[in-house]
């Protein structure tokens, strides 16, 4: 689930098109979009760096986004 959420964040912010599975679910997109922009914008579109950033900031993420990383 982490990978799908992060892939969505990277593709959403970068405007890159990937398959629906890689883009995450609508729930994941809603849950993490604002947090990704707030905490990890400088790492987009590098999926690995966005993932690391989100994981480093997991305690600062909204409860809905935190749930996507469990």
Image (cartoon, rainbow, N blue to C red):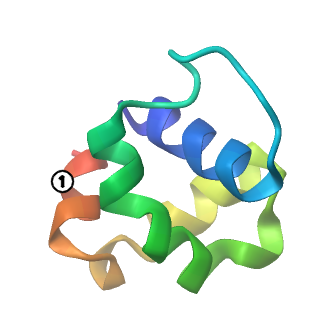
The image quadrant of residue 18 is top right
x and y, in percent, of residue 64 in the image: 18, 62
Q: Residue at x 25, y 62 (%)?
A: 66
User: Mark 1 Cα within 10 Å, few/some/many (few <14, many 20+)?
Assistant: some
The one of 52 and 32 positioned closer to us in this rendering: 32
Q: Dot 1: what SS? A: helix
Q: Left or right: where does residue 29 sit relative to residue 40?
A: left
Q: Left or right: where does residue 49 sit relative to residue 4?
A: right
The one of 66 and 21 positioned closer to us in this rendering: 21
Q: For the image shown, how many numbered marks are present on the structure?
A: 1
Q: Is residue 17 visible?
A: yes
Q: Residue at x 40, y 61 (%)?
A: 32
In the displayed structure, would residue 20 be above or below residue 61?
above
x and y, in percent, of residue 61 in the image: 33, 76
In the displayed structure, would residue 9 be above or below residue 26?
below
x and y, in percent, of residue 60 in the image: 33, 85
Q: Residue at x 80, y 67 (%)?
A: 43
State the residue position of label 1: 67
Report the quarter where the N terminus lies. top left
The image quadrant of residue 70 is top left
Q: Is residue 56 visible?
A: no
Q: Left or right: where does residue 65 sit relative to residue 2?
A: left
The one of 2 and 37 positioned closer to us in this rendering: 37
């Amino acid at each position: 689930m982490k990978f799908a959420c992060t892939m969505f964040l990277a593709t959403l912010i970068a405007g890159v098109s990937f398959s629906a599975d890689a883009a995450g679910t609508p729930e994941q997109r809603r849950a993490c979009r604002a947090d990704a922009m707030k905490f990890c914008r400088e790492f987009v579109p590098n999926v690995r760096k966005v993932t690391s950033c989100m994981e480093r900031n997991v305690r600062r993420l909204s409860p809905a986004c935190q749930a996507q990383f469990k």
